[in-house]
Image (tube, rainbow, N blue to C red):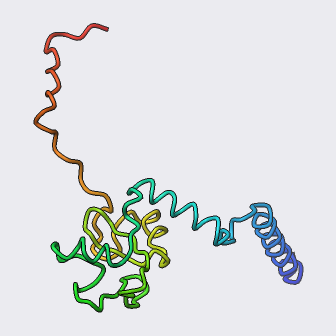
């Protein structure tokens, strides 16, 4: 095989691979596109509220009052707190909505994409704690489970 023929064969193989990759990308709709901003965001908010509870979406003032005793929040605990995602200050009197994580008490602007972060990572962006509290110990008024029989098992 001459060098010119080998070079032409290499070019043909590379061109065939490029055509194959383009065909795969075109055949898989939505693989390389971002979801629609409105539909995806609404579904993400609904999923997070279902997992964490609807009470986690509150105004900044409510979150600040609830976290005052614990010293928690999205920042340093001062009046000029910043959202850890967008790094902008919270508006103290505007009634802006924040998402509060029940386990750690940190909160973030609802518009900053914390819902998407929680869906992907499943941890607080500030302290990396799980967003939901640990299960509570059994209540004393509940009877314990009876012990299993220790005899041989019948099949």
Disc tally is 0
Q: Quadrant of the N terminus?
A: bottom right
Q: Residue 36 vs residue 53: left or right? A: right
Whole-percent x, y for residue 131 in the image: 33, 62
Residue in view at x 37 percent, y 64 percent: 56
The picture quadrant where one finds residue 106 is bottom left
Whole-percent x, y for residue 24 in the image: 77, 63
Q: Name above or below for residue 152 compared with residue 101.
A: above
What is the residue that sits farthest to the top in this orientation? 154
Whole-percent x, y for residue 107 in the image: 34, 74
Q: Nearest the camera: 85 or 90?
A: 90
Q: Name above or below for residue 148 compared with residue 151.
A: below
Q: Nearest the camera: 114 or 68?
A: 68
Q: Nearest the camera: 75 or 60?
A: 60
Residue in view at x 31 percent, y 77 percent: 126
Q: Residue 20 vs residue 45: left or right? A: right
Residue in view at x 58 percent, y 64 percent: 42
What is the residue that sits farthest to the left in this orientation? 140
The picture quadrant where one finds residue 34 is bottom right
């Amino acid at each position: 095989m001459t060098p010119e023929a080998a070079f032409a064969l290499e070019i043909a193989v590379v061109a065939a691979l490029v055509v194959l990759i383009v065909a795969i990308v075109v055949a898989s709709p939505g693989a390389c596109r971002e979801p629609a901003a409105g539909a995806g965001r609404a579904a993400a908010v609904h999923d997070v509220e279902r997992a964490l509870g609807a009470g986690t979406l509150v105004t900044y003032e409510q979150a600040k009052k609830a976290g005052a005793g614990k010293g928690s929040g999205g920042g340093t605990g001062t009046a000029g707190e910043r959202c850890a995602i967008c790094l902008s200050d919270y508006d103290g009197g505007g009634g802006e909505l924040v998402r509060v994580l029940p386990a750690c008490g940190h909160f973030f602007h609802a518009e900053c994409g914390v819902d998407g972060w929680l869906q992907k990572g499943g941890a607080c962006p500030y302290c990396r704690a799980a967003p939901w509290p640990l299960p509570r110990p059994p209540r004393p008024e509940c009877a314990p489970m009876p012990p299993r029989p220790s005899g041989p098992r019948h099949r």
